[in-house]
Amino acid sequence: MLGRRTDILAGNRLAMALIVDFDALPGPERNQARFVFLDPCARDLYADWETVAADTTAMLRMDAGRHPDDPWLQGLVEELSAHSAPFRRHWVDQKVHERADGTKGYHHPVVGDLTVTYQAMKLPAVEEQTLYIYTTEPGSASEAALRLLASWTTSRKKGEPAETVGADPSRSAGSGVPRI
């Protein structure tokens, strides 16, 4: 679930395993835009990173239009502008975007390539929160990959480091928890 400024408000274990374990990050870093532009793992994760980057920037631009005096949003834009040339390039395009539905491809480090379809639903009782539901094509390789990822996430105990169950053994110990 996303809030204003692409803040990550909630996600189930499977979503956290598919993208990144936002719950393990400090509060200010639980943000989709920060992940997309500042975490090098994002470029590897998204099959079409450039489109994800453009859409994420356009979502922030939409928020900026709705809330021009939001100091936290202004701070986020300044931070991303200072540290990401792609963000600066997309920001000057002045495109706005509100996600409704679409597809997204992933190069996942544990289960490989998969494509999901998503639906974005605004919650009428709670302003500025959007629930995203990801699905895969029944019987597809993507469905099999997502099922494998789901079994991997349920085999982990809460708080157990991700690399202890099903992780890629070629990752160096110094790289920390795999970003999945």
Image (spheres, rainbow, N blue to C red):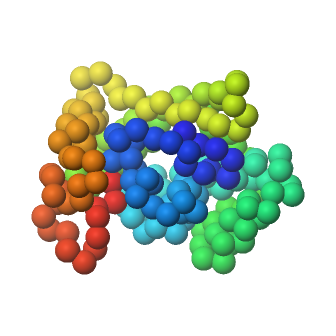
- Does 166 sit left or right of 42 as displayed? left
**Which one is in front, 168 or 163?**
163
Q: Residue at x 19, y 69 (%)?
A: 171
**Which one is in front, 138 or 18?**
18
Q: Quadrant of residue 27?
A: bottom right
- Does 169 sit left or right of 136 as displayed? left
**Which one is in front, 76 or 92?**
76
Q: Position of residue 21 (x, y in %)?
A: 39, 53
Q: Quadrant of residue 109?
A: bottom left
Judge whether residue 46 can be spotted in this image: no
Q: Position of residue 29 (x, y in %)?
A: 53, 63
- Does 151 sit left or right of 2 as displayed? left
Q: Quadrant of residue 150?
A: top left
Q: Position of residue 98 (x, y in %)?
A: 68, 39
Judge whether residue 68 can be spotted in this image: yes
Q: Residue at x 62, y 50 (%)?
A: 6
Q: Position of residue 51 (x, y in %)?
A: 55, 51
Q: Residue at x 35, y 29 (%)?
A: 136
